[in-house]
Amino acid sequence: MITRPSDLRAQAETASAHLPALMLSAERLAAMIAPGAHGLRRAGTGEDFWQYRPAGIGDGSRNIDWRRSARSDAQFVRDQEAQTAQTAQIWLSPHAGMDFTGGDDRPTKSATGRVLSLALAMLLLRGGEKVGILGGPVGTGRLQADRMAATLCAPATDTAFPEYDLRPNRRVIVIADFLDDPAWVQSFLTLAAATGVSGMLIQLLDPDEESFPFEGAIEFRDPTGTTRHHSRDAGGLRGEYLQRLAARRDWLRQQAGQAGWQFDHYLTSQDPAHVLGRIWALLGVGGLR
């Protein structure tokens, strides 16, 4: 099938329509969390910058920085620290179920996930880290953020699990609702652990999926509309549903822990700044080394 240039341009304009808004939302969100974010640093033999610490027992006179020490009453030792460029990859589930929202007044899981993914990427990029979408190229700088925004806004292929493009010593952040068949999670994490990849699983749900507020006669359909379930008493299903949701989360947390990963969950109704701040804190304090 031959695509006319006019059709191609129309498709391109449609695909890129959300880019400015997405970039703006992500930039504002990133700025709220960490205006001066920096990348992970480790002590080493690099040449990026020096740090000072008070001299202690075992530090000989040759190790003391006398120029720095002259500015105070204490003696300081100069250690060299290298800022190492870490590599992080983000995967946002393209599953059809991510397009669900329980109300017109709140975003879909996909929309929330796109903003969180790009804002998180911007924080990492500001710190000099290499970032990319899992399965795609990694890079640094504003141009890479633009590429990631374009990828996140492109029509999604309904792939239930991330491509297993895992590289040693990288970090991977997976954002999904984890309501579908979870078999891929175990195999993915097993491979990640064997490859030396650390990371975080983030479950993103709509408030209706969290509380199951349904009552009376309701027809439930899967995201594709191929499976339907008619219930005359939806409220009677709530208890079992909540038990299964809790069990799924316990399982995800267990699987993540066994692989040396982290797990957390959020709602689309939560303040995006709070959610991103929490994720950023876990990435920094939890280490994801």
Image: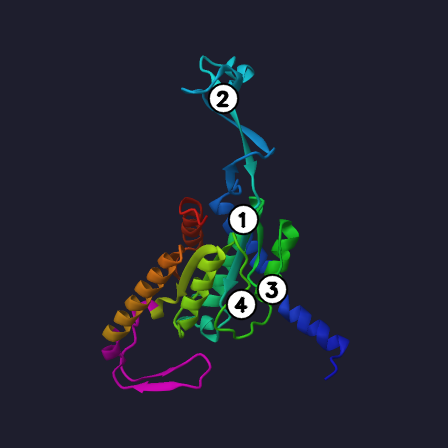
Q: Which residue is labeled 2 in the image?
A: 77
- Location of residue 250 (image quadrant): bottom left
Q: Which residue is labeled 3 in the image?
A: 151
Whether 14 is drawn above or below 71: the answer is below
Q: Which residue is labeled 4 in the image?
A: 163
Q: Which residue is labeled 1 in the image?
A: 124
Of residue 177 and residue 115, the one placed in the foreground of this image is 177
N-term mark: 4 or 3:
3
Q: Are marks 4 and 3 in contact (CB under 8 Å)?
A: no
**What amino acid type is highlighted by mark number 3?**
Thr
Q: Which residues are magenta?
A: 210-238
SS type, badge 1: helix
Whole-angstrom CA distance, mark 2 to mark 4, is 47 Å
**What amino acid type is highlighted by mark number 2?**
Val
Whether 219 is drawn above or below 189: the answer is below
Q: Position of residue 236 (x, y in %)?
A: 23, 79
Whole-angstrom CA distance, mark 4 to mark 3, is 15 Å
Whole-angstrom CA distance, mark 1 to mark 4, is 22 Å
